[in-house]
Image (tube, grey):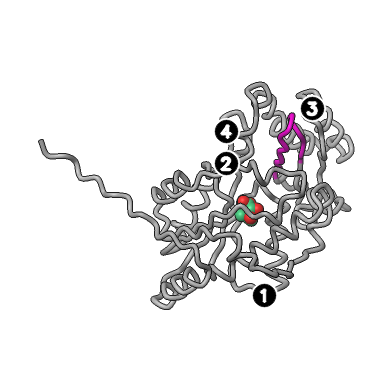
Amino acid sequence: MPQPAVSPVAKPIIVTDPIAIREQVRAAQARGRRVGFVPTMGALHEGHTSLVDRAACECDDVAVSIFVNPTQFGPSEDFSRYPRSLESDIAAVAERGARWVFAPEAESIYPPGWATRVEVEGPARRFEGEIRPGHFSGVATVVCRLLLAVPADEAYFGAKDWQQTLVIRRMVRDLGVPTGITVCPTVREPDGLAMSSRNAYLTAAERSRACGLFESLRLAEQGWLAGETVAVIERAMAHHLAERGVTVDYAAIVDRDTLDPLTDETSPAVALVAGRLGMTRLIDNILLPLRR
Ligand code: PAF
């Protein structure tokens, strides 16, 4: 019996050498192709594949990098146990039509004798910047290095790491990196938990309490729409997280572009939360509707 025609999934080209990927991207651009780039640390989930889908919609060719960046982990953080799943990650991005997977060795990103870091101030100072010293310097350094290797027209990042997107935008602007930055919506599980590679660390009991982060953001939105003060809403968020057994690092409403305290409650605002369930640290945020 004739089989239905199924178009085979084209395998992405796997490149490990930064010079080789740069040449291939430049050659595609010279042929008039717009190149999109999705930097990742692997352990891909639907949040990542939604970025690849967006890049594929807006660009002719898509590159995805998979590199667990050591410099953005603190000494007591989870670098060594961070999930690594290169084969299934390659299969996932192949299905979404990525043209290249850039999977460099650490030595080609940080060559022997490496001595250069990119330090961002401003939006990197508070929240994750205070709790994870050196983290944003590691992120800015590797993203700068990756954008030199993959000189894409547009790079795509998830809004779940809102502060990271502000740091990357600032780095790209301040250093004149000629790649546009697109921030895409957070992808959530049915109960609201933001997709994250670190969700895999949660025990069943922790997983059932992890939606407390999103619930506290929903509470913030309701309070915000009801006209409550920032202080009252922040207390309610922290209280809800604690009730859900989340050890709170912060629960805050701040200016969404600078992360400074709001001086005017009609400015665009973001609600940010971070906390720990057992050994696992999770973060989340939502952009609050404009107040008139
Ligand atoms: O968001 C991430 O996965 C990482 O911080 C990034 C941007 C790929 C840099 O390592």
**Residue holding disc 2:** 187
Front one among 73 and 253: 73
Query: Which quadrant of the view contains residue 124?
Result: bottom right
**Residue holding disc 1:** 176
Q: Are marks 4 and 3 in contact (CB under 8 Å)?
A: no
Whether residue 243 is in magenta: the answer is: no
What residue is shown at x 42% (from left), y 75% (from top)?
27
Report the Cα–Cα distance between label 2 and label 4.
7 Å
Report the Cα–Cα distance between label 1 and label 2.
30 Å
**Residue holding disc 4:** 189
Question: Which residue, as the protein is rendered here, is positioned at the far front?
Answer: 112
Q: Amino acid at mark 2?
A: Val
Report the Cα–Cα distance between label 4 and label 1.
36 Å
Q: Earlier in the sequence, mark 2 or mark 3?
A: 2
Quarter holding the N terminus? top left
Secondary element at image label 1: loop
Whether residue 276 is in magenta: the answer is: yes
Report the Cα–Cα distance between label 1 and label 3.
42 Å
Q: Amino acid at mark 1?
A: Gly
Question: Which residue, as the protein is rendered here, is positioned at the far bottom?
Answer: 30
Report the Cα–Cα distance between label 2 and label 3.
22 Å
Front one among 111 and 263: 111
In magenta, the rendered stretch is 273-286
Q: Are marks 1 and 2 in contact (CB under 8 Å)?
A: no
**Residue holding disc 3:** 240
Secondary element at image label 3: helix
Secondary element at image label 2: loop
Ligand 1 contact, mark 4 (Cβ < 8 Å) = no
Q: Amino acid at mark 3?
A: His
Q: Nearer the viewer, mark 1 or mark 3?
A: 1
